[in-house]
């Protein structure tokens, strides 16, 4: 493996990529982590779902701790965006701002980006930091127990998120993002049964004052304790496609086997780019599985310790 710069190149420095980096360095593998610095985990003001932190921990602090741990065992971590990934004989070549490197294997932990609601960017970031906008009801639905909650979305996806949040509070309103609601009759019946109010769009967040956020709609102003955008997300599969990996048509995620192998030998994937569960614990678990698989696959070729 001496003809390659690295045994493994990890692309993405969120929970999946950094967990893999910790494992891989402790397997005595030579690796590089390249991260664009936009992990969704870093947005989290305080997560209370992460085991071991009974008082919670911010996503930014968690990521920094994981980086420190990976570096302790020899991982090189660079902030950059990989723009090209090509298959070469026996491995891969990747490009970013500092040039080209080669690696025997590559782990894609490139994640997804949530689609944002229509609002000023600075207002969005302020509201997100204060818990007035939330993206993951599985993560923090507990924090809106018995509060006034708005869901920006429509169709079956918006209805599903509103219904999910209804198990935390009786005060849930579904607001269409850009037009009148288009909701199947069966879903309308369910919404009525559960007491979920519907408001037609378009809507726009116009203020985040005190502990509330206000949305403007054709039906008037609505003020909530928290708003959940249910607008879907965009999966970062560009590099996987460059390398020839199979992408699921239904989920738009990278297809992997039970050990995080893609359809391309030597190329692995983990985290939300595989399935958008939006859970740190799940991403970390896949990172551990991927790293162990990479180690075992490389060990079939030759002993790893130099």
Image (cartoon, rainbow, N blue to C red):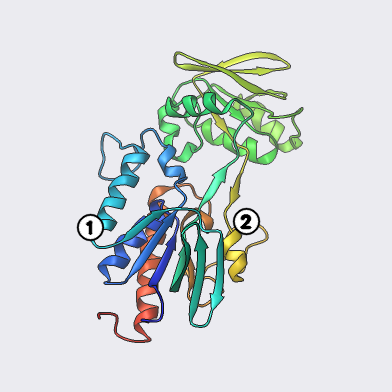
- Number of marks drawn: 2
Question: Which residue bears the numbered disc 2?
Answer: 251
State the image coordinates of residue 204 (x, y, percent, origin top left): 65, 23
Q: Count neighbours of disc 2 (C-alpha within 10 A) and say few if under 14, some if 14 to 19, many if 20 or more.
A: few
Seen in the image, is 136 located left or right of residue 156?
left
Q: Which of 271 and 182 is in front in this view?
A: 271
Q: Which residue is drawn at 28% across and 57% down?
A: 70
Question: Which residue bears the numbered disc 1?
Answer: 72
Task: Specify the quadrant of the image occupied by residue 162.
Answer: top right
Residue 254 visible in rendering: no
Q: Which residue is drawn at 57% across and 54% down?
A: 236
State the image coordinates of residue 106 (x, y, percent, origin top left): 46, 69
> Which badge, 1 or 2, is on the more N-terminal residue?
1
Seen in the image, is 217 located left or right of residue 36?
right
Secondary element type, mark 1: helix
Label annotation for residue 178: none
């Amino acid at each position: 493996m001496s003809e390659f710069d690295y045994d493994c190149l990890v692309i993405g420095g969120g929970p999946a990529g950094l967990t893999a980096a910790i494992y891989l360095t402790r397997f005595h593998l030579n690796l590089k982590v390249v991260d664009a610095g936009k992990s969704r985990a870093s947005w989290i003001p305080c997560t209370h779902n992460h085991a071991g932190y009974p008082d919670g921990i911010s996503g930014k602090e968690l990521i920094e701790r994981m980086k420190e741990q990976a570096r302790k065992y020899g991982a090189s971590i660079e902030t950059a965006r990989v723009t090209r990934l090509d298959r070469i004989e026996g491995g891969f070549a990747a490009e970013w701002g500092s040039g080209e490197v080669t690696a025997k294997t590559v782990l894609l932990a490139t994640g997804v980006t949530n689609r944002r609601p229509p609002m000023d960017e600075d207002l969005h970031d302020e509201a997100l930091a204060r818990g007035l906008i939330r993206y993951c009801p599985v993560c923090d639905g507990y924090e809106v127990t018995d509060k006034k909650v708005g869901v920006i979305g429509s169709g079956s996806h918006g209805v599903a998120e509103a219904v999910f949040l209804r198990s935390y509070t009786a005060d849930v309103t579904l607001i269409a993002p850009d037009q009148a609601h288009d909701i199947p009759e069966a879903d309308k019946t369910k919404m009525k049964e559960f007491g979920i109010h519907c408001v037609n769009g378009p809507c726009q967040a116009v203020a985040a004052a005190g502990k509330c956020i206000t949305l403007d709609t054709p039906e008037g102003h609505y003020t909530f304790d928290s708003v959940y955008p249910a607008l879907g997300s965009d999966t970062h599969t560009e590099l996987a496609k460059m390398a020839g990996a199979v992408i699921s048509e239904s989920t738009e995620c990278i297809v992997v086997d039970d050990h995080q192998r893609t359809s391309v030998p030597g190329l692995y994937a983990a985290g939300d780019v595989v399935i958008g569960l939006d859970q740190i614990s799940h991403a970390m678990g896949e990172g551990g599985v991927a790293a162990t698989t990479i180690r075992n696959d490389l060990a079939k070729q030759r002993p790893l310790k130099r």
